[in-house]
């Protein structure tokens, strides 16, 4: 049994009113970030699981990996928070100006 899919397109006959206003791009100041540290490769010991042919990372290595990933996450969240504060500040400045 063969299935076929048929598609039809319907053109939209409604025309748009006036063109949208062009907006000036918001210029943001680059944030001071520290360069990433040089990476080093480390060997990780694997532990055999209770299931045949399944190996897991040792508990200590897994915990260290989790802590490192949490540090990265906290850094990224703090950078997003700083940038969001800048956006809110710029928005408040724009909204505080009187409309013409």
Image (spheres, rainbow, N blue to C red):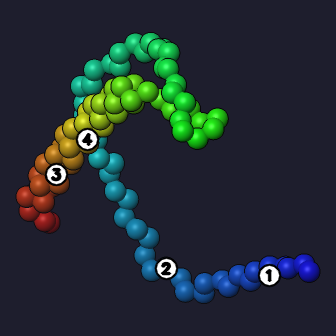
Q: Quadrant of the N terminus?
A: bottom right
Q: Looking at this rendering, what residue extends furthest in the right direction?
A: 1
Within 10 Å of disc 3 (Cα), the crowding (few <14, some 14-19, many 20+) is few
Residue 33 sits in quarter: top left
At horizontal 30% and vertical 30% (from top left) the residue drawn is: 67
Q: Earlier in the sequence, mark 3 or mark 2?
A: 2
Residue 57's spot in the image, x, y percent?
47, 29
Residue 37's spot in the image, x, y percent?
35, 15
Within 10 Å of disc 4 (Cα), the crowding (few <14, some 14-19, many 20+) is few
Residue bearing mark 4: 77
Residue 62 sits in quarter: top left
Q: Earlier in the sequence, mark 4 or mark 3?
A: 4
User: Which residue is more in the foreground, 53 or 77?
Assistant: 53
**In this view, 41 is above or below 1:** above
At horizontal 13% and vertical 65% (from top left) the residue drawn is: 99
Residue bearing mark 2: 16
Q: Nearer the viewer, mark 2 or mark 4?
A: 4
Residue bearing mark 1: 6
Q: What distance separates the C-alpha of mark 1 from that of mark 2?
A: 29 Å
Give left or right: position of 87 versus 46.
left
User: Which residue is more in the foreground, 9 or 7?
Assistant: 7
Q: Quadrant of the C terminus?
A: bottom left
Residue 46's spot in the image, x, y percent?
52, 25
Q: Nearer the viewer, mark 3 or mark 2?
A: 3
Q: Nearer the viewer, mark 3 or mark 1?
A: 1
Which element is circle 4 on? helix
Q: What distance separates the C-alpha of mark 4 from that of mark 3?
A: 16 Å
Which mark is drawn over residue 88?
3
Q: Nearer the viewer, mark 4 or mark 3?
A: 4
**In this view, 19 is above or below 63:** below
Residue 68's spot in the image, x, y percent?
32, 28
Q: What distance separates the C-alpha of mark 3 from that of mark 2?
A: 32 Å
């Amino acid at each position: 049994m063969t299935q076929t899919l048929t598609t039809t397109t319907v053109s939209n006959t409604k025309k748009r009113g006036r063109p949208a206003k062009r907006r000036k791009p918001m210029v943001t100041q680059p944030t001071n970030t520290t360069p990433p540290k040089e990476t080093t490769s480390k060997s990780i010991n694997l532990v055999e699981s209770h299931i045949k042919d399944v190996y897991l990372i040792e508990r200590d290595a897994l915990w260290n990996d989790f802590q490192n990933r949490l540090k990265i996450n906290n850094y990224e969240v703090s950078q997003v928070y700083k940038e969001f504060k800048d956006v809110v500040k710029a928005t408040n400045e724009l909204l505080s100006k009187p409309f013409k």
